[in-house]
Image (spheres, rainbow, N blue to C red):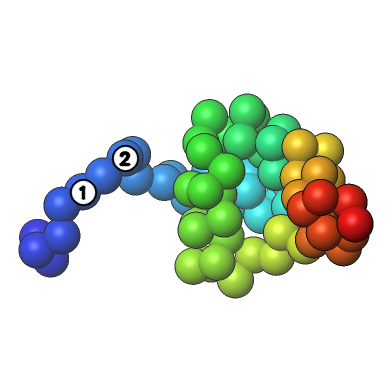
Amino acid sequence: MNGRPRIGNAWSREEIGKLRELAGSGTSLRSMSRILKRSESALKNKAGLHGISLQGSGSKGNRLSETNSKVGAFGL
């Protein structure tokens, strides 16, 4: 044991391969989360550890925050 408490479920090679496949096809982060039964945060963390780009994997649920960052939180 490395001294850190283990949280969550370990990822299988198949799951990491599926994450890579879904990200490469432009599947939304929300859809990937449902398909892999993992949180969006878990997907982002695992993708980062394995060098998997999620750039093309936007989520409709994230569009509001994208709009707010461009226009401002109050639309001013």
Residue underneath mark 2: 8
Residue at the location (52% across, 48% down)?
41
Q: Position of residue 46 (x, y in %)?
A: 50, 57
Question: Is residue 28 something that shows in the picture?
Answer: no
**In the rendered view, would you say 61 is above or below 12?**
above
Q: Where is residue 23 in the image (x, y as percent from the top left)?
A: 73, 52
Left or right relative to 60: residue 45: left
Q: Where is residue 22 in the image (x, y as percent from the top left)?
A: 73, 46
The one of 68 and 4 positioned closer to us in this rendering: 68
Q: Residue 6 carries which label?
A: 1
Q: Is disc 2 in contact with disc 1, using a CB cutoff of under 8 Å? A: yes
Residue extending farthest to the bottom is 51
Q: Which amino acid does label 1 sit on?
A: Arg
Q: Position of residue 9 (x, y in %)?
A: 33, 39
Dot 2 falls on a residue whose secondary structure is loop
Left or right relative to 68: residue 15: left
**In the rendered view, would you say 9 is above or below 42?**
above
